[in-house]
Image (cartoon, rainbow, N blue to C red):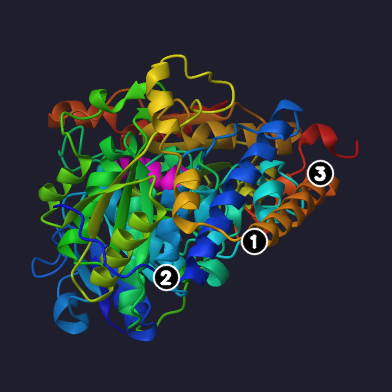
Amino acid sequence: MPELTFLQAISRGIWEEMEADPTVFLMGEDIGRYGGAFKVTEGFLDRFGPGRVIETPLAEEGFVGAAIGAAYVGMRPVVEFQFIDFIACAFDQIVNFACTSRYRWGQGVPLTIRGPWGGATKAGPFHSRNVEMWFAHSPGIKVVAPSTPADAKGLIKACIRDNDPCLFLEHKSLYRRLKEDVPDQSPPIPIGKARIVREGGDLTIVTYGLMVHRCLEALAELQGLSVELIDLRTIYPLDRAAVVDSVKKTSKIMVVHEDTRTGGIAGEIAAIVNEEAFEYLDGPVVRVTAPDTPVPSAPSMEEVFLPSVKDISEAARRLAAY
Amino acid sequence: MKANPATDAPPRALQLEMYYHLRLTRALDERAQILYRQGKVIGGLFSSLGQEAISVGSAFALDKGDYVGPMIRNSGTVLVRGHSARDVMSNYLAKATSPTGGKDNSQHFGDIARTGVVSCISMLGTLVPVMAGMALGARMKGEKRVAMTYVGDGAASTGDFYEGLVFASVQKLPLVVIIENNQYAYSTPTSKQSLLKNLADKSKAFGIPGYVGDGNDVLEVYAITKKCVDDAREGRGPQLIEFKTLRMRGHAVHDDASYVPPELFEEWKKKDPIARFERKLKLSGGEKEEIGARLKATVDDAVEFAETSPAPPGENAYKGVFEDDRIVQFTPWWKRDA
């Protein structure tokens, strides 16, 4: 079984789908000879040729629109954004054209949009953003954000096979940091299912992406506290049952995300818990999130911006003691 | 580039079909205006009055398997491509029997498999990259299909227009883009969109051919479009055409177009595409009668069909966002059994 980094797992997942299905093809900037800004598509041009690895002009709205058109005639495009922040340049094609397509005229769009996402790489305000809620709030697209190589491989496959638009978010600070044995030809992992990373009885922590790993670090410091850690894996559709079942067991819940606070998924989860498990709660639903600011460049400021291991463990202790 | 239409006029049978579709487009538009004033049209009503020749002439230049992305004033295009008058009318009225089942309205519908028509959205220019992608997908599958779409003089200012044509040109895709220059984008004259005398000169930015034609001459529209469609199909890459015309009503029914100088309307009224084509065609008494009867039957049937069709069931609002409807199904707390 090969040991794969997070990045290699994504790459292998796409590769296996392209081997299996001739309608799967790639579009994006610098994805050919150069192999993409982070090298996710290195070697793809040699194997699949320029007909299926299409290097695009610097025109995000244009190539996302073209991907939608190709999807309309039976292809399964996988579009790369060099950094997911640039998805804003293609917002209209995604939220107005692709997201509404099946609803308004019955024409599904089997489109996968993927790209490096998130902070903790000192990349500043335009290469660190958390874009997930722009799309979670636009009916018609699924939003997926894995935190391990195995999940990344299984979920990119599920996105490519899905008959609706999917946004696949790759935390770039995990690209080369994580390694895991992931079997060849591994099956897709269903979109919309959370993963219980660790079972516990005192407190539920819900998170996703890089923050799964910061929460695991925090857990190591929280000796004596039995924490149930849930990795959402999919932001939309949200696995409401996994969250509600857990809080019914633990009676306390906090949500951790590196996305900014207002309108983040933590608010939605708090509302779900409030409606579905109000009488089970023994404390407030707590949020640990980034502040409502752009992502700052200087490491000293980015450290403050992002929820830290210390923030998470402090919040967990306070909530546990409530 | 100056227009270089094919010298041979199309056979009379085809010309008669063009004439019928020009008349059908106008007749449906006139009936829709009445239905709108009766409060029966859902959403806005965007007239194609005076511009019918561009839709009809260009649509006849396509082959059966080609793809086309019309705008809201291109009901002529969808009729030529095989959508029925019932489709047009029922979608205006957002009925259950309409092509979108009432999910969308206006000229927003299509059927890729049957007619090759792609439904547009209100954000103009968006179809340029999408149609480029359809041409790309078809080419990847080894098919020689052409994709065609329209923008107005306004939408020729959008990023989508440029980005779609940039992509299509470097990929040498079989894409034909028609700029339907009707001189006004809502109330904004073309002089506030561009300093160019001919918007077709934008083709130079992409290194592709650009043509200018008389949008009120259906045979010229057909000939120029046919040449471009043939060239695109033969691998000569995207083609840009500007057809000049005038929007003969306001942006939509609510707009009286008081900002358009009356003498401009007078000038273009003389160039009416249907009257001009009639002078050329010299219809026989029998032809006139036959077309008149066919028109009346088709339009009456479409209006009756649309008016008597049921509204879509309200609960359909929850359906069709995703392939799996369960994703959006949710019973709010306050609606559940206590």
Instruction: Give the quarter of the figure containing the N terminus of chain A.
Output: bottom left
Instruction: Give the quarter of the figure containing the C terminus of chain A.
Output: top right
- Picture layout, residue A67 above or below residue B162: below
State the image quarter where residue B286 is shown.
bottom right
Counting residues from the start of the chain, the first of labels 2 and 3 encountered is 2
The residue indicated by pointer 3 is: B307
The residue indicated by pointer 2 is: B66
> Can residue B145 be seen in this snapshot?
yes
> Circle 2: is it few (<14), some (14-19), or many (20+) Cα within 10 Å?
many
**In the image, is A316 to the left or to the right of B178?**
right
Q: Secondary structure at mark 3?
A: helix
**In the image, is A152 to the left or to the right of A119?**
right
Counting residues from the start of the chain, the first of labels 1 and 2 encountered is 2
Determine contact: label 1, label 3, CB under 8 Å: no
Residue type indicated by callout 2: Asp
Q: Give residue B264's position: percent from left, percent from top.
A: 37, 23
Q: Nearer the viewer, residue A208 or B297?
A: B297
Q: Secondary structure at mark 1?
A: loop
Question: Magenta residues, as a range?
Answer: A87-98
Q: Nearer the viewer, residue B308 or B170?
A: B308
Q: Main secondary structure of the magenta part?
A: helix
Whether the magenta-drawn stretch holds residue A93 is answered as: yes
Instruction: Tell me how far mark 1 sits from mark 2, CA to CA.
Output: 30 Å
**In the image, is B91 to the left or to the right of A312?**
right
Residue shown at 36%/82% (left/top)? A22
Whether the magenta-drawn stretch holds residue A14 is answered as: no
> To which chain does the residue with label 3 belong?
B
Residue type indicated by callout 1: Asp
> To which chain does the residue with label 2 belong?
B
The label on residue B324 is 1
> Circle 3: is it few (<14), some (14-19), or many (20+) Cα within 10 Å?
some
